[in-house]
Image (tube, helix red, strand yellow):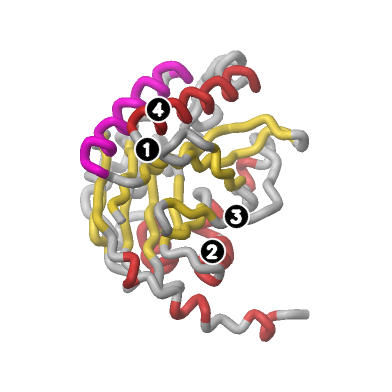
Amino acid sequence: MRIALASPPVPQSLDSGLVVFEELVKLASESKAEIICFPESYLPGYPGMGYSDQDRGAESLSGALDRAAEVAKSYNIAIIVPMDWHSSAGLVNTAFVISSKGEILGHQTKNQLDPSEDNMWVSGTQRHLFEVNGVKFGISICHEGFRYPESVRWAAKNGASIVFHPHYTENRENGKISAEWGSMDNPYYEKAMMMRSIENTIYFASVNYASEYMESATSIIDPEGKCIAYQDYGKSGVLIKDIDIDRATGFLAKRFKSELYQK
């Protein structure tokens, strides 16, 4: 399967985000990718960045999802588009999966919020598996993929060959610019990516924004825990890679004895 991971700049507005969204989808489609994934909360953008109430409103977000579906159909490519979304329970952090025909296949909410996000969103409550072109995959959003490996193991145990991991890491206060993938001086994030793949024997595709002080790169990790591709720090664009689904056996995940950890 040929996958694409989009590393856009942090959007200035919902409209500007949609413009870049289509540009990167077009690039992925021209490279014959079958699916493209964007970073966490891409539409309208991660909270706290000064987006207008209109951009964050239910009607605007619904219209943005409709536009994303049109783009998927126009460029004949499946898309994972992370968004804020107004649910009956409140505002959730979610990722919609859209088929290459523009059909909404479902969505995965962020169920394990970072403590700093408790006032931003309400937690989701369910996990889902998705399938595109015969390949099953899961989605784990940012903090839950970094800190709650169970979110990834669930997908692997249920047949996922790959877990997509939309996230956002940046430390403007620290002001450090990363230079080497997986460096011992980097934060733990890239090491966690390696563990999510190797402990489950699946691919792990982690997707970040392109920003000056990003703390982790957009990366593809193979089932043996090796980083096989990453986007240069701070560089906007699309990371494209062919992955061998037959290597993603889920072997270690399937050996997990959940009954040993019951109360």
Q: What distance separates the C-alpha of mark 3 from that of mark 1?
A: 24 Å
Q: Is residue 18 above or below residue 144?
A: above
Residue type highlighted by circle 1: Tyr
Q: Is residue 262 above or below residue 152?
A: below
| Mark closer to the observer (3, 4) | 4
Q: Residue at x 48, y 39 (%)?
A: 98
Label 2 crowding class (10 Å Cα cut-off): few <14, some 14-19, many 20+?
Answer: many
Q: Is residue 27 visible?
A: yes
In this figure, which residue is indicated by the disc labeled 2? 155
In this figure, which residue is indicated by the disc labeled 1? 209
In this figure, which residue is indicated by the disc labeled 3? 128
Q: What distance separates the C-alpha of mark 3 from that of mark 4?
A: 24 Å
Label 3 crowding class (10 Å Cα cut-off): few <14, some 14-19, many 20+?
Answer: some
| Mark closer to the observer (1, 2) | 2
| Mark closer to the observer (3, 1) | 3
* Circle nearer the N terminus (3, 1): 3
